[in-house]
Image (tube, rainbow, N blue to C red):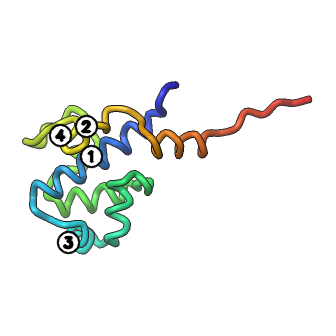
Amino acid sequence: MEVPVQWKYRRLLANRLKELRTAKGIDQLDLALKAGLSRRGVGGLERMERTPTLDMIVVIAAALDVEPHVLISPACETGLDAEVPSSNPDAQGMIGEEAGAWQEHRPKASVED
């Protein structure tokens, strides 16, 4: 089954966000305060439980002192592990809850009688 493109970018954002945040020694609360978001919101993005808005990406990037495209571009070099952080080896493919969540939100096919 093909993974929807938006899930690939949400996973990339989640991994990159955590990677950059931890590399800078910032916890979720500090990042949230600096970006004007809630800690729960930052954690939700890192766990792929929240859908990021463009505004969220921009304020988080500013709080991390990077350009917004760094958070979602597979080609961007962060000076760290660019594609998938080594702390998350399962991030290469859809796994468990992530695949289940996609199945739940997928449009249902309708059959007309």
Tell whether label 4 touches label 2 (CB within 8 Å): yes
Q: Position of residue 84 (x, y in %)?
A: 23, 37
Q: Badge 1 is on which residue?
A: 15
Q: Is residue 47 left or right of residue 83?
A: right
Query: SS class of the residue under badge 4?
Result: loop
Whole-angstrom CA distance, mark 4 to mark 1, is: 10 Å
Q: Position of residue 111 (x, y in %)?
A: 82, 30
Q: Badge 4 is on which residue?
A: 86
Q: Residue at x 42, y 35 (%)?
A: 94
User: Mark 1 or mark 2: which is in front?
Assistant: 2
Query: SS class of the residue under badge 1?
Result: helix
Whole-angstrom CA distance, mark 3 to mark 4, is: 23 Å
Whole-angstrom CA distance, mark 1 to mark 2, is: 11 Å
Q: Badge 3 is on which residue?
A: 30
Whole-angstrom CA distance, mark 1 to mark 3, is: 18 Å
Which of pointers 1 and 2 lies earlier in the amino acid sequence?
1
Which of pointers 1 and 3 lies earlier in the amino acid sequence?
1
Whole-angstrom CA distance, mark 2 to mark 4, is: 6 Å
Q: Badge 2 is on which residue?
A: 89
Which of pointers 3 and 2 lies earlier in the amino acid sequence?
3
Tell whether label 1 touches label 4 (CB within 8 Å): no
- Amino acid type indicated by mark 3: Asp
Which of pointers 3 and 4 lies earlier in the amino acid sequence?
3
Q: Nearer the viewer, residue 96 or 22?
A: 96
Q: Is residue 35 left or right of residue 6?
A: left
Packing grade of label 3 (10 A; few <14, some 14-19, many >=20) is: some
Which of pointers 4 and 1 lies earlier in the amino acid sequence?
1
Taking 76 as reference, is 32 above or below it? below
Packing grade of label 2 (10 A; few <14, some 14-19, many >=20) is: few
Query: SS class of the residue under badge 2?
Result: helix
Q: Residue at x 9, y 59 (%)?
A: 24
- Amino acid type indicated by mark 2: Pro
